[in-house]
Structure formats: structure tokens, C-alpha cells
Image (cartoon, coloured by chain):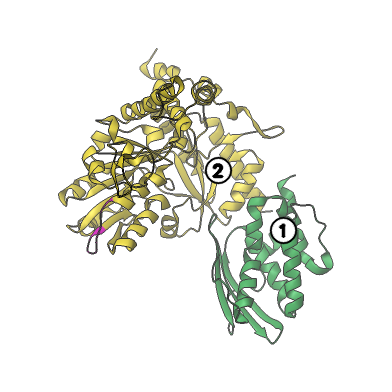
């Protein structure tokens, strides 16, 4: 196991040139999530249009893994219908909990397959999940479900 | 031979390192451990490990409640450890030394028992570890008292300019850190204590980061209570210390209730044991106290002055070398004046988490994050820092490994 398996080119590219970054209007819900052990934080907005994820915008600060993950996540969910975006979330969650034992499906996860290596580093899994957890929470709030505003 | 050379001979770093078995391990094959996370916890010498093993193999029994041989031996070892602590910090009376779980528990004990009311004020500083901040937030919220704090200067010191406005006749407690775990700053205890005494406030010192590296004299410091912890001073985890003036501790109500802390118990009510037992409810951490006693013997044999000098040299070396790393900014004092060997820094454009991960690949263990001092991180505009911290067994070679590691990190992220 070497650290190169975690710091894939795709991850470093997204880190240096993040997609969909910056808070935008309009939005249906805004959440702020923290990673209290390392100081990563993200403020994330979701706008839904019926069952479609119309926009996801965010402002965040943190390590390369958390920043790249937010960028990849926004790429994956914007424009998708909620059911499909949620199943992508489920699949990414499963990948991150796999401790490196799962072969990711590139058709579903696209650039997010690059995070397979991160799943071998327990301390970093929560960095990769921060934006996804914030997205899930924001969608819940936008749909009027009871959710937590921070973790 | 000059005096300097004699002092260096007396502190034989390679002999010292042989006492710490873990320093010989490799993090992975061919990658030796470079342990620079000492402000989080220290490593343990063989003498401490042997003492704890011997305690369990030869003397284990509960303390203060048996008349058989083992119970008497265990009690003597446990109370002997208290004597060692009392002597190590120059307490006037062994009854002033209370064993707790850690510094956090010692500080919570005070925050829960010192009487406060609406209109009272508690003063802390912006560089407190959460352990000396959150208990006082809870205490002031519970009682309606007000929490105030001493701010920080840009170079990582307490801003004492408006001390007169912060510490006033309403101040009941001034709780502050001796040496910052984030910034490395050693605070001017005398200045703060003088002001607190003027207004009759109780002074509480968090000495978790100072006792292991410079030693302290609680009477000379002039404070009313001091909290510190065993695991940062080469002792085991699970054992912390509260020292408090007997008059103060006698005046406070009990913290936790249970066995051992009572004098007489009826169904209608109870009376309390005398110090120190009033604050030691239940079976204490006996093996841990005994292990701490061995750690104190170890530190005393090396000599706290020699340890302090060794770490001072290392800190000067580290500060000098780190500041030559391109894009590196020290968070905290940049010189060794009133400063200990916990050095936080930011590396331009690279998050501490990534710095720590790549350093680990090279066997270099540092701490990354906000170090349980988030308000101070906010003060300096960083979400987190990378922190390297030395101890009595750290070598300049390990500082070199850190600096070379940082060069590697910079190259890695500029590809």
C-alpha cells in the first residue's frame, strides 16, 4: 500500500481545478458540515426542480481529498434525477466503506472511482464523504425531511 | 573539558533512546519511525512498562480497603506515587495531589465544584485547549456567570494590553494554559497571577504541556490549582493530576460521589473523607499511578533541567530549519524565547491533512488538525495546522527527516 494509490491524478486535478465551486442562487436548502477532527468544512446548497437535482453549489475548505470529492460529487449529481443521484451516493458510500476490497463501477461512479484507494485509509474516509453527507442532508432538508444541519 | 561538553555528555541521547523500545520500530519495512507527535502523547520508557507489569504480576490488589499483604503493598505503591508527584512539583502537602483520569477531568472537577453565580465572571484565554475552555463554558452556562477571555497577539502571545479590563472585581476564576499545545507559547504566569490576586480570583493553570518538558514548582508559580497528565510525561494513559492549595480543595464540595470519598454514610446522607480521598471516588487507576511514579523517577534521574536544555536546543534547531522551507509559516512564536517544542505551521497551498499523510509515508509522525484549540486556529485564519513536537528522546536527525519530508510534500503537490 503506497500513498500514490490515494493521491490519484484525477483527485489532484479536481483539487487544483474544482468544478461547480462557489455558492449560487437560487437554492432550496443550505447546510454546513464540519469534519471536527481535521477542520475540513463545507457549506453546500441544493436546488431541486421536481425530482431533478437542478444545482449543487458549495464553498469549502479542506484537504485535497475532501475538496476533490466535492468537485466530483457535484459533477455526478447535477442534472440527475434524485433516485439515480441517491443510488450513486449509496454506491460511493459502499465503496468508501469497502477498505479497498471493492472494484468500483466506472459507469456509475465515473471520476469517483479514483477514491477507491482512499477507502484503505480509515482516517481519510470521512474527508472523502464530507461533501456527499452534506449533499444528502441538504436534499433531505429541501424535501422537508427532518435532518441535521451539521455533523 | 568545558562545562558545556560535560553537560552534553551527561545527557547521552543515544542511551536515552535505548530506554524507549518503540523508537526502534519501523512504520513499515525499511521505514523507521520518526515520532514528532509528542504534544499529543509521549512514548514510554522500559522502566515504566516494567514497573506496571511488575505491579500486576506481584502486587495487584485494591487499595485502602484490605488488611492482607497485597492490599497493603498496592496501597503503599499507590500512595508512594502520590508522594513522588508531590515532590516532583514541590507541593507543600501530599494531600494537595489528587489523581484523576486526565487533565480534562482535573479541570472539569474544578469547573463543576468552584461556586459561581450570575454576575460572576470567569476568564480564560483564546489559546486554551478545549479541555480548559469547554468545562468553563458549561460552568458559566449552568450558573449564569459570564465567560471572558484574553485575546492573542499576531506573534502568538497573550495580549496583556487590556488585562485590567478583562480581569475585574467580578472575576472569580482565571483559568489559563502554561504552555500552548498549538502555538508552543509559554505564558507569563506571574503577570496573570498578580492581576488575578489583586481582584481575589482563583487561578487555575493547565500545565499539561509544561510539566513534561520543563518541570514546575507549584508554590513558586503562585497559582491556586494546576492540572496535568501522566501520558505526556512518559507515564501511562488514564492517569491525570490535580494539584490544588489545601484551603481551596477543602472548601470545595465533592465532584464524584461513591466509595472511598466518604467519611460516614447513612441512608439519610453522608459526610466526606478528608483530602485527597474526598476527590477520589471509586477504585482509582492504581497501576497507572504506579506507572506514573516510575515515569517521575525516570524524568528525575535524567533531570528536568537537562531535559529542558536538550529540548530548547532542538526547538531552536527546528525553528531555524523549518523557516527555511519555502512557503512555510510558523503559527506561534518564531523564536525560542518563552517557547516550548510544539511547533505548528502552515505550508502554502497544501492542507495539513495532506502534509501529514505524505509525511507518514516517510515514517514521520506529526499531528494535523486544530489540535483541540479551534478558537486559536480561527484567530490565525487557518482551519488546521501541521504540528511537530519534540520530547526528551528527539534528535536533530529527526528534525532533518521532517524538513526533508516537507520538501518531498512540496514536490509531490507541485507535480
Labels in figure, total: 2
The residue beneath circle 2 is: B366
Quadrant assignment, res A18: bottom right
Closer to the camera in the image, B139 or B286: B286
Q: Are marks 2 and 1 on the same chain?
A: no
Left of A10 or right of it: where is B291?
left
Picture coordinates of residue A99 (x, y %)?
74, 52
Farthest residue, direction top: B1
Q: Which mark is residue B36?
A: none
For disc 1, the marked residue is A96
- Which residue is painted at 24% across and 34% down in the image? B219
What is the magenta range? B114-121
Q: Assign the magenta stretch its main secondary structure.
A: loop
Q: CA distance from mark 2 to mark 1?
A: 25 Å
Residue B155 lies, with reference to residue A133, above or below; the image says above
Q: Position of residue B368 (x, y in %)?
A: 54, 49
Give the number of the mark in front: 2 or 1: 1
Q: Colour of chain A?
A: green
Q: Is residue B198 left or right of residue B236?
A: left
Amino acid at each position: 500500500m503506497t500513498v500514490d494509490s490515494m493521491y490519484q491524478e484525477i483527485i489532484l486535478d479536481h483539487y487544483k481545478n474544482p468544478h461547480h465551486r462557489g455558492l449560487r442562487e437560487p437554492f432550496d436548502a443550505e447546510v454546513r458540515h464540519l469534519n471536527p477532527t481535521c477542520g475540513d468544512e463545507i457549506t453546500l446548497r441544493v436546488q431541486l426542480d421536481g425530482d431533478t437535482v437542478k444545482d449543487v453549489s458549495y464553498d469549502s475548505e479542506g484537504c485535497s481529498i475532501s475538496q476533490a470529492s466535492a468537485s466530483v460529487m457535484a459533477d455526478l449529481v447535477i442534472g440527475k434525477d434524485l433516485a439515480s443521484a441517491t443510488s450513486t451516493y449509496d454506491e460511493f458510500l459502499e465503496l468508501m466503506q469497502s477498505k479497498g476490497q471493492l472494484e468500483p463501477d466506472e459507469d456509475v461512479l465515473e471520476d469517483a472511482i479514483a477514491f477507491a484507494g482512499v477507502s484503505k485509509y480509515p482516517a481519510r474516509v470521512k474527508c472523502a464523504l464530507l461533501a456527499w453527507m452534506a449533499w444528502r442532508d441538504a436534499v433531505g432538508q429541501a424535501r422537508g425531511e427532518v435532518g441535521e444541519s451539521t455533523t | 573539558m568545558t562545562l558545556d561538553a560535560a553537560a552534553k555528555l551527561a545527557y547521552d541521547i543515544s542511551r536515552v533512546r535505548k530506554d524507549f523500545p518503540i523508537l526502534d520500530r519501523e512504520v513499515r519495512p525499511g521505514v523507521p519511525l520518526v515520532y514528532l507527535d509528542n504534544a499529543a502523547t509521549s512514548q514510554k520508557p522500559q522502566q515504566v512498562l516494567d514497573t506496571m507489569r511488575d505491579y500486576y504480576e506481584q502486587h495487584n490488589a485494591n487499595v485502602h480497603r484490605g488488611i492482607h499483604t497485597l492490599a497493603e503493598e498496592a496501597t503503599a505503591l499507590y500512595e508512594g506515587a502520590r508522594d513522588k508527584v508531590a515532590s516532583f512539583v514541590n507541593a507543600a502537602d501530599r494531600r494537595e495531589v489528587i489523581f484523576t483520569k486526565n487533565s480534562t477531568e482535573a479541570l472539569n472537577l474544578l469547573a463543576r465544584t468552584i461556586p459561581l453565580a450570575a454576575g460572576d465572571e470567569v476568564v480564560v484565554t483564546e489559546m486554551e485547549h478545549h479541555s480548559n475552555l469547554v468545562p468553563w463554558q458549561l460552568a458559566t452556562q449552568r450558573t449564569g456567570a459570564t465567560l471572558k477571555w484574553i485575546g492573542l497577539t499576531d506573534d502568538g502571545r497573550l495580549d496583556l494590553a487590556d488585562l485590567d479590563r478583562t480581569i475585574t472585581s467580578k472575576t472569580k476564576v482565571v483559568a489559563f494554559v502554561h504552555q500552548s499545545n498549538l502555538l508552543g507559547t509559554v505564558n507569563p504566569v506571574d503577570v496573570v497571577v498578580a492581576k488575578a490576586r489583586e481582584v481575589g480570583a482563583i487561578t487555575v493553570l493547565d500545565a499539561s504541556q509544561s510539566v513534561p518538558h520543563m518541570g514546575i514548582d507549584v508554590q513558586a508559580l503562585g497559582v491556586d490549582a494546576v492540572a496535568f497528565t501522566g501520558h505526556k510525561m512518559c507515564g501511562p494513559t488514564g492517569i491525570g493530576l490535580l494539584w490544588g492549595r489545601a484551603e481551596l480543595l477543602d472548601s470545595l464540595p465533592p465532584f464524584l460521589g461513591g466509595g472511598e470519598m466518604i467519611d460516614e454514610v447513612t441512608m439519610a446522607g453522608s459526610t466526606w473523607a478528608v483530602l485527597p480521598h474526598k476527590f477520589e471516588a471509586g477504585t482509582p487507576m492504581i497501576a497507572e499511578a504506579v506507572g506514573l511514579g516510575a515515569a517521575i523517577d525516570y524524568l528525575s534521574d535524567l533531570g528536568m533541567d537537562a531535559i529542558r536544555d536538550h529540548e530548547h536546543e532542538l526547538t531552536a534547531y527546528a525553528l531555524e530549519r523549518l523557516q527555511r522551507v519555502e512557503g512555510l509559516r510558523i503559527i506561534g512564536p518564531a523564536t525560542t524565547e518563552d517557547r516550548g517544542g510544539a511547533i505548528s505551521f502552515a505550508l502554502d497551498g497544501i492542507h495539513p491533512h495532506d502534509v501529514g499523510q505524505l509525511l507518514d509515508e516517510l515514517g514521520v509522525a506529526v499531528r494535523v488538525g486544530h489540535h483541540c484549540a479551534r478558537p486559536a486556529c480561527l484567530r490565525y485564519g487557518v482551519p488546521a495546522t501541521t504540528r511537530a513536537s519534540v520530547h526528551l528522546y528527539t534528535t536533530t536527525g529527526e528534525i532533518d527527516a521532517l524538513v526533508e519530508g516537507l520538501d518531498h510534500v512540496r514536490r509531490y503537490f507541485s507535480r
